Image: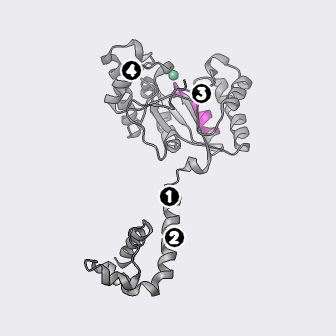
Amino acid sequence: MWRKAKIVMAGVCAAGVCVVPSAAGAATAPTTNTAATAQAGTQKAETNQTKTQKAETKQAGAKKSVPYCARYKCIALTFDDGPWPYTPELLDTLKKHKAKATFFLLGRKVAYRPELTRRIHEEGHDIGNHTWTHPSLTKLSDGEVIQEITSTSDIIYQTIGKMPDYMRPPNGATNARVASLMTSLGLPQIMWTGSTLDWQARDTKVIAQRTLKLAKRNGVILLHDIVPETVKAMPSVLTALEKQNYKFVTLTTLLQGRTLRPGEIYPPRGK
Ligand SMILES: [Zn+2]
């Protein structure tokens, strides 16, 4: 208790509120509480100790509050439209490089491959909602949009015991109405800073080159684990980015220290 009281006092003093010297303190502050009076009496003897504690507390606080990606060069690789038969090979590659990623899964594929979905989750990757059938949500009725999203969140919850924290609109198709529906469902919308168009390229070398070109600190890269050439490109991509000191993180880690509002689009779209 005493330790705690001292630290609190040190904090108050540090904030500039407690500026009264020890001798004058008792005389000019008749309403001083017990802890403050006790501190005034022993302040001289403890000055050094308190200073050290203050410094230590400050240091520990700073370490804790600095988000991981403020300290390291992070990148979030995101893989859409699985889980798919190529996903295990990608998971093996990620594991080999101690890389974490984010998977935007389709509800109907989760229903078909629950074991693989659980593996993604158990190996520390994030799972996001990418709808049940991959429609452009802007073309659906409100009821259909809600059905696509809630059925997918439900199957993800049934499979891994955790609701997804965010969604990605198929084809990046969203508008004010979709945003307002996502707000009501409590889900931020995750887009990307760079799209490899890997589903068009279908070429391992091209996909690797594009990914490296799009890589940037705190970037969110759109890839697909249903594209076999993408999965084949990842070992060389991860090796090259490691040499540039990148850390491969989930969106949750990338977003540490920032709270997204339901419906909000992240990263914000450029002009
Ligand atoms: Zn997709």
Nearest to the observer: residue 240 or residue 68: 68
Is residue 166 at all visible to an observer of this figure? Answer: yes
Q: Is residue 48 above or below residue 200?
A: below
User: Horizontal placement of 103 versus 164: left or right?
Assistant: right
Reading the image, the residue beneath label 3 is 223
Q: Nearer the viewer, mark 3 or mark 1?
A: 1
**Viewer-nearest of discs 2 and 3:** 2
Q: Indicate yes or no whether the magenta region holds residue 157.
A: no
Q: Is mark 4 within 8 Å of ligand 1?
A: no
Instruction: Give the residue number, with chain letter if any, for mark 2.
Output: 56
Query: Image quarter for residue 176?
Result: top left
Query: Does label 3 or label 1 sit earlier along the sequence?
Result: 1
Q: Which residues are magenta?
A: 80-93
Say which amino acid is labelled 4.
Ala
Rounded to the nearest angstrom, the CA distance separating label 1 from label 2 is 12 Å
Depth-wise, is mark 1 or mark 2 nearer the camera? 2
